[in-house]
Amino acid sequence: MDKKTLLLKRLSSYSATAAAMTALSTSVSGQIYSGPKNILVDNATVNIDLDNDGTNDFSFENGTFLYYGTRNFNQIRSLDVTNNKWIASTMSSMVSAFGPNISFPYYSPGSTTTFVSGNLGDTYFNAGNFAGLGDKYIALKFSASTKLGWIRINIPGGHATATIRDWAYTEGGVSNFFTGSLKPVVSNSSVSDAAATTAKLNLTSNAEGTVYFAVQLATTATIPTAAAIKAGTGFLATGSGAATADAALSLDITGLSENTGYKIFYIVENPLVSGNISEVGELSFTTPDITAPVLSAVTIDGITATGADAHLTANESGTAYIAVLAASATAPVATEIKAGAGFAITGNKAATASVDVEFGLTGLISETDYKVYMVVEDASGNISEVSSASFTTLDITAPVLSAVSVDGITATGATAHLTSDEAGTAYFAVLAASATAPVAARLKQGRGLQLQAILL
């Protein structure tokens, strides 16, 4: 059977002389420790400390075999024959548990030879034909039978070498364990490609299994149990996907809202054992804001000959940009306004949502038509549509008169002439030559003057 076969080891049924392996579907605890991977056994003896306690439990030996005189991988040896045992006694039990057989390579392929001494506690485990069969599992118990586990091994055809792929074990009263069973451990987890309504969950699991995830709002999130994540009810978004051991996996997260903070919780469940689940993982992320600000209340006041005040209000905070051009000029686009090149006046200010932003405009030319263009960019880089307002600076230069003359004089009348350098309304009054000359305001009002007129 391959590694997905559920193999139950009933420790209580083992004695010093016999053991049996039975395939059942009982769920059990996951592994305590997962060993290093891909240890080559080549022209040497490799000792293995399964539980990482400083004491070697088994040795994998490559040497000159007694009968054939060739250097090959030829045996696995218990380093404590009392406490470290293979979980099998005869070839028939191994056939039912592992497939063709679980013996070792220097016997002819297809051999049904039993262990050298036929007992569970044998020093040597050196019968059989693993060579060229790919990855195979060896079931074992060790440390005074308190720990139960497996070793995965690969022996090439010809059995010159062997590779210890990995191993795992469990302890603490567990009475059964599955070959290939690993408690998933997640690494390299991240959230990427966050868009307005989607994102990706990325992770790597050391064991194959099913990844489950659940999403909550960051502001109200509480860490759920693994069972709740797997059930997938009561969350904003959920999903699952198949993980391959040591391979990067990316899963789509959908159904999100823009500009929102989230927390995603995830687990990996090994399919070999129900309940063999990783620790709950947690990541935070925020979807981007893709909505541009909207401007309102764009107005101009405080107009003088050389300046004015421009106002705007936006529905969200950001940076306000302004550009002033002659009214006849081509209207700029938002990016040009932000760049601020080639305008009569440019500037920017921080904008708070729904609060008036005022720009004081100075250095303008009197009696000139202008147009103000404004945009607001939010913290996510979204820029509003361009809003504009027109105004004309005031005229503060008095007309200059020339060619003032009188002709067509008669006994009772005459004709007065003037020329002005700009259009307007002409006022005049006639007084006796000896009278005091009126000021312009009195002349315009015409009060107390003998003769006055308005010329349009």
Image (cartoon, grey):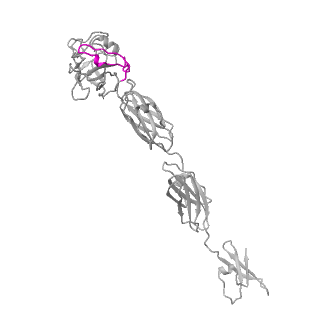
Name the quadrant containing residue 220: top left
Look at the image and tell me whether residue 412 can be seen.
yes
**Above or below — where is 281 with respect to 97?**
below
The residue lying furthest to the bottom in this view is: 434
Q: Quadrant of the C terminus?
A: bottom right
Residue 444: horizontal and vertical position, in percent? 68, 78
Name the quadrant containing residue 165: top left
Q: Is residue 22 magenta?
A: yes
Q: Nearer the viewer, residue 119 or 68?
A: 119
| Relative horizontal placement of residue 233, taking residue 56 as reference (left or right) | right
- Residue displayed at 65% across by 82% down: 439
| Relative horizontal placement of residue 212, taking residue 361 as reference (left or right) | left
Name the quadrant containing residue 227: top left
- Count the marks: how many? 0
Look at the image and tell me whether residue 105 can be seen.
no
Which residue range is magenta in the image? 1-27
